[in-house]
Image (cartoon, rainbow, N blue to C red):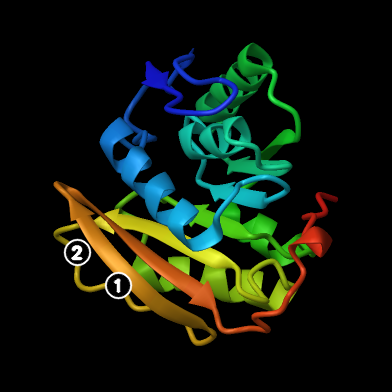
Amino acid sequence: MVRIVAGAAKGRRIAAPTGNGTRPTSDRMREALFSALESMLGSWHGMTVVDLYAGSGAVGFEAASRGAASVVLVESDARAVRTLKSNAAHLDLPGVRVLDSSAERFAQRESGRADVVFADPPYALGADELRQVLANLMDAGVVAGNTVVVVERASRDPKWSWPHGIASLREKAYGEGTLWYGRAAGDTAADSTDSAVDVN
């Protein structure tokens, strides 16, 4: 079970998918992630968040609990999708949508800017494949105008490098996993109120 750390659903627990196909972000790493993001963004109120390779949805549900207005949980594994839908019904947080889709398909068909994109793919996914997903999100305008992008990769992997158009901010290792923070090199005056992600 995974615990929601703060916000409206603080202390409530959600299920993690069975099997080895997903790897929930640890409570410790999630607390550090949200502390870092809050120092960058301030309040979560009104934010639009995309959680790619969502797994249990821990990161997306945490954002919704803290006040994000729109959270899209993107997952293609059938067992994980069932768990996400069950968790969403259990928490009943507003603005949360579960999308049964690969990150690749999502990136190719979406439009509308997100404030935060979190990507925690299986560690076996190649860095080039993940960079292409992020590049497609930039082409679609999902990552644009100061969007913060966070990628979780295995600490043992070679140093992560961002695709053109995303500037590196920081990195921090937590045991086997490392969080890499970047920001779209767009218009810093972009208005986050125009940031709803359209799901076709």
In the rendered structure, which amino acid carries the disc numbered 2?
A: Asp
Query: SS for tag 2?
Result: loop
Label 2 sits on residue: 157
Q: Residue at x 62, y 35 (%)?
A: 64
Which quadrant holds residue 67?
top right
Q: Mark 1 near mark 2, Cβ–Cβ under 8 Å?
A: yes
Vertical position of residue 99 compared to residue 78: above or below = below
Left or right of 105? Residue 54 is left
In the rendered structure, which amino acid carries the disc numbered 1?
A: Trp
The percent position of residue 100, horizontal first and vertical second, equals: 67, 38
Q: Residues within 10 Å of mark 1 (few under 14, many from 20)?
A: some
Query: SS for tag 1?
Result: loop
Q: Residue at x 52, y 34 (%)?
A: 62
Instruction: Please state, as top left, top right, bottom left or bottom right, where the N terminus lies in the image.
Output: top left
Vertical position of residue 159 compared to residue 26: above or below = below
The percent position of residue 63, horizontal first and vertical second, equals: 56, 39
Left or right of 18? Residue 70 is right
Which quadrant holds residue 16?
top left
Q: Residues within 10 Å of mark 2 (few under 14, many from 20)?
A: few
Disc 1 and disc 2: Cα gap in Å? 8 Å
